[in-house]
Image: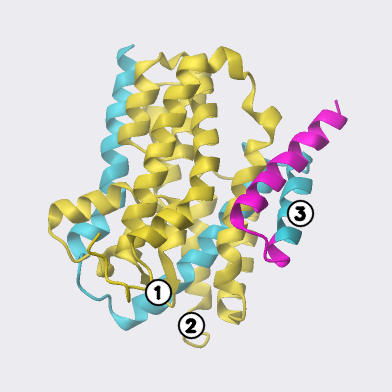
Chain colours: A yellow, B cyan
Amino acid sequence: MSEEPSEPRSYRHGVRAVLPLAVAVFGFGLSYGVLAPAAGMGNAAPIVMSITTFAGSAQFAAASVLGAGGSAATAILAAVMLNSRYLPIGVSVAPWLEGNAWSRLLHAHVTVDESWAVAAEGHGRWNPRVLLAAGTGIWVAWVLGTIGGVLFGNAIGDPNRLGLDAAFPALFLALLAPQIRGNRTAMLAAVLGAGIALALTPFTPAGVPIVVAGAACLLGVRPAREAA
Amino acid sequence: MTTIWVVVIVTGVATLALKAAGPLLLGGKPLPARITSLVSLLAPALLAALVAIGTFAQGQHLVIDARVLGVGAAAVAIRLRAPVLLVVVLAAAVTAGARALSG
C-alpha cells in the first residue's frame, strides 16, 4: 500500500508478470499431483515435497525413479543433479538480496527458473521484489496444483494430452526472447547453451546437460567483449 | 513408505542448500566485476538449455514429436510480440492438437 509510485519494478510488477506463468505452473502441479501418487509416492509425500523442495523437474525425476523401483539414493541423486543449476542461479541473485539471513533464505526458497527469469533486469541485475512476488505466486500455484492433482487425479487423466509438456519450453522461450533481442553476446550464450545441452543429453543423466550448458558457455564466452 | 520420506526430506534439504548457498554466503555484497559479466550470460544460456531440453529430450533420448510444432508456434507468437499467456496456451493447444490428430 505504501508503495513508491516511482518504483518502476515492484512487488506489484512481479505479481502481474507472474500471472500467466502461474497458470502454466498450476497445470504442471496438477500433472505432478496426478503422476506422483501413481508412481507409488502416496498422497501426502508429493504435497509435502511441493511445499519444501519446490522444484518441478526434480520432483518429477524423483517420482519416476521411485515409480520404476529405484532406490532412495538414486531418486535423490537424480533430483539433486537436476537442481544443481540453482547453485549458480543463487549466486547470480545474491548481490541483490540485502535483508537478513531469514529474508535471504525466503528469497532463495522461492527462486525457481520462472521467478528468476522474470526478475532478471539484464546485465547481471536482478530485482529482489519481483523475485519474491513472482516466486511466491509460483509457489502457491505449484502447491495448489499438486493438491488438486492428488485430490482429482482420476478425473484429470493423462495431463500430457493437454500439451502441457510443450508449455514449459514455450514459456522459457518467451522469457529468453527479451534477453537476447539486440544483444549479440547473450544470443551467442543462448545458442551455445542450447547446443551443449542437446549434445550432452544422450550421454549424461538428466540435469547434467543444463548445468554444463550454463557453465561451459560462460567460460566460452568470457574472452569476448564484456556483456554490455 | 520410509524410502519415500527419506527422498522427500533429503531432496528438500539439498535443494534449499543449493538455492541458499549463494544468498546466505554472498548476500548483499556485489560480486567481483568479472563474475558479474559472466552471471549476466547465465540467464540466456540456462533458459536456452531449458528450451532445447524441454522441446527435444525424452529422458536421455532426443526425439522430434508434437512438442516441436507447439514450441514452433510459440516462437512465431513471440516474434509477433504476443503476450506470454497466449504464447503458453498456443504451445499447449498446438501440441495437444497434433497429438490428437496423430492418434
**Callout 1, which amino acid?**
Gly
Q: Nearer the viewer, residue A39 or A204?
A: A39
Label number found at residue A227? 2
Label number found at residue B61? none
Residue A73: % across, % down: 37, 27
Q: Name the residue under label 1.
A: A124
**Kind of element beneath mark 2:** loop
**Callout 3, which amino acid?**
Gly
Relative vertical location of residue A160 with respect to residue A19 in this rendering, above or below:
above
Question: Does residue A225 appear left or right of residue B1 in this picture?
Answer: right
**Kind of element beneath mark 1:** loop
Q: Nearer the viewer, residue B40 or A116?
A: A116
Q: Distance between the residues labelled 3 and 1?
A: 29 Å
- Check whether the beta carbons of the residues at disc 3 and disc 1 lie within 8 A of each other: no
Residue A219: % across, % down: 47, 72
**Callout 2, which amino acid?**
Ala
For image coordinates 74% across by 46% down, the residue present is B70
For image coordinates 47% across by 79% down, the residue present is A222
- Check whether the beta carbons of the residues at disc 2 and disc 1 lie within 8 A of each other: yes
N-term mark: 2 or 1: 1
Start-end of magenta stretch = B78-103
- Check whether the beta carbons of the residues at disc 3 and disc 2 lie within 8 A of each other: no
Residue A23 in sight: yes
Neighbourhood count class around disc 1 (C-alpha, 10 Å): few under 14, some 14–19, many 20 upward: many
Respond whether the residues carrying marks 3 and 1 are from the same subunit. Answer: no
Q: Name the residue under label 3.
A: B72
**Kind of element beneath mark 3:** helix
